[in-house]
């Protein structure tokens, strides 16, 4: 909760609270915690983890979430994207995709935090999610996540050229230059990182002034 | 000072109420006509689809109520679009407080920079014209989420450029409106809400 308020005051543009083990362990995100965070931050707030029914999303909306992120549950039941978009509007629905690189432009979609490969392929699944009403795609490359060697820019740029909704890039941030690359080479609409901010390896105000200097249009 | 947030079938009312709590302002979320009329100020929030929301407002006689309000009224996002004369979203006539029209963003063709619709994220507001804004807010960034935009017109109170220049705020008499979400626009948004509270 304190971290959320701190990031907001430091100039983070959006906050995502993802309980990435929720599906794996079969537990629900804590609605009360979401409510306490939402009360204290004045920037857009997305919540994900363990959302598999409309009533899960409704509880989070009422707790002050601006958007929800669905991942494994959408892969299992793609109709959930349509239902969420029809009930709450596309702007409320972020479809998160975790994918592993196979070869060339083939990426396999995985679920349960990258543990289980599925039949779905990255680009066709992202397109389907858009057609079903997703408002944004959060794409995490499981090959780049945690490695800190940069984002999956080639795949991101391909996805960006094929979709008309915004794409949030995740996985691989290790330096400020990686963020510049994801917005220029990767054509991403937003860049997400967790550990480098949590462990204070990069400070958000420094990152944003760097990006502005490099010609990326960011809010300071 | 009491603010009425009009309750109808739209999302994100909670975000608006949390923002008012952070400012220490008393508010009530209500669809009761008398409570709305008696409030010092009224906020008409909105996230949703225009034609179905207009239908809902008519069924609940909120359409007649809103246009007759005399105290300062602030429409947000879809709230602003519904205060215009007509929306291309569901081809529907709206409340007609502002003569401006609501149109769908067309993606540029060709689109080498991969511009996206909806316009989602932070963008600058310029050419500020109403008491919602003070000089310190010129060129500041606020948060947007929308696929339809209000064309520029006589009541444009702020301009934002995305694909084309459009009205990111409107003002006429006691009616104020923002296409962006002040409740989600950091300290800049808080300041705009504070300016509205002080009107």
Image (spheres, rainbow, N blue to C red):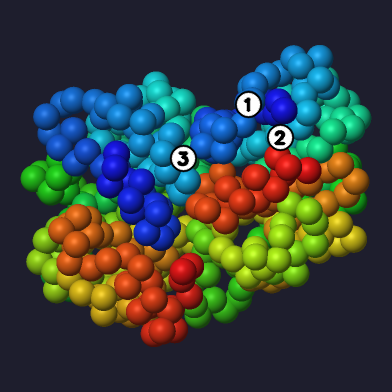
In the picture, the disc for residue B26 is 1
Rendered view: B139 above or below B196: below
Tell me whether marks 3 and 2 sit on the same chain.
no
Point 43% across, 34% down: residue: A39
Percent coordinates x, y for residue A203 in the rendering:
27, 66
Rendered view: B75 above or below B154: above
Nearer the camera: disc 1 or disc 2 = 1
Q: Residues within 10 Å of mark 1 (few under 14, many from 20)?
A: few
Nearer the camera: disc 3 or disc 1 = 1
Chain under disc 1: B
Classify mark 1: helix, strand or loop.
strand
The reply to whether dot 3 and dot 2 touch (C-beta < 8 Å) is no
Percent coordinates x, y for residue A98 in the rendering:
21, 52
Q: Who is closer to the viewer here, B189 or B32?
A: B189
In-image side of A38 versus B68 (left or right): left
Chain under disc 3: A
Percent coordinates x, y for residue B3 in the rendering:
70, 28
């Amino acid at each position: 909760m304190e971290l959320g308020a701190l990031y907001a005051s430091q100039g983070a543009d959006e906050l995502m609270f993802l309980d990435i083990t929720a599906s794996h362990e079969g537990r629900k995100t804590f609605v009360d915690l979401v409510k306490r965070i939402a009360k204290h931050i004045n920037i857009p707030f997305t919540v994900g983890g363990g959302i598999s029914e409309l009533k899960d999303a409704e509880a989070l909306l009422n707790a002050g979430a601006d958007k929800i992120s669905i991942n494994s549950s959408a892969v299992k039941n793609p109709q959930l994207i349509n239902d969420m978009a029809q009930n709450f509007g596309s702007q409320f629905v972020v479809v998160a995709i975790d994918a592993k690189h196979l070869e060339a432009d083939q990426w396999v979609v995985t679920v349960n935090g990258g543990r289980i490969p599925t039949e779905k392929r990255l680009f066709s699944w992202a397109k389907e999610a858009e057609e079903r009403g997703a408002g944004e795609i959060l794409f995490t490359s499981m090959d780049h996540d945690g490695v800190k060697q940069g984002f999956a820019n080639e795949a991101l740029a391909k996805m960006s050229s094929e979709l008309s909704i915004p794409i949030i890039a995740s996985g691989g941030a290790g330096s400020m230059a990686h963020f510049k690359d994801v917005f220029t080479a990767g054509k991403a609409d937003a860049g997400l990182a967790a550990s480098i901010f949590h462990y204070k390896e990069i400070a958000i105000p420094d990152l944003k002034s760097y990006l502005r200097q490099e010609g990326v249009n960011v809010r300071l | 000072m009491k603010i009425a947030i009009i309750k109808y079938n739209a999302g994100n009312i909670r975000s608006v109420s949390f923002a008012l709590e952070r400012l220490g302002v008393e508010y009530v979320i209500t669809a009761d006509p008398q409570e709305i009329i008696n409030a010092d100020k009224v906020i008409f929030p909105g996230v949703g689809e225009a034609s179905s929301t207009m239908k809902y407002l008519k069924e609940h006689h909120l359409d007649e109520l809103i246009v007759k309000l005399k105290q300062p009224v602030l429409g947000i996002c879809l709230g602003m679009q519904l205060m215009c004369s007509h929306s291309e979203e569901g081809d529907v006539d709206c409340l007609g407080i502002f003569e401006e029209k609501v149109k769908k963003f067309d993606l540029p063709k060709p689109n080498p920079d991969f511009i996206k619709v909806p316009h989602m994220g932070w963008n600058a507001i310029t050419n500020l014209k109403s008491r919602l804004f003070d000089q310190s807010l010129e060129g500041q960034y606020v948060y947007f989420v929308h696929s339809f935009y209000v064309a520029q017109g006589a009541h444009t109170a702020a301009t934002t450029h995305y694909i084309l220049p459009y009205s990111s705020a409107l003002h006429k008499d006691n009616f104020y409106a923002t296409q962006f979400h002040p409740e989600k626009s950091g300290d800049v948004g808080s300041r705009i809400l504070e300016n509205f509270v002080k009107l």
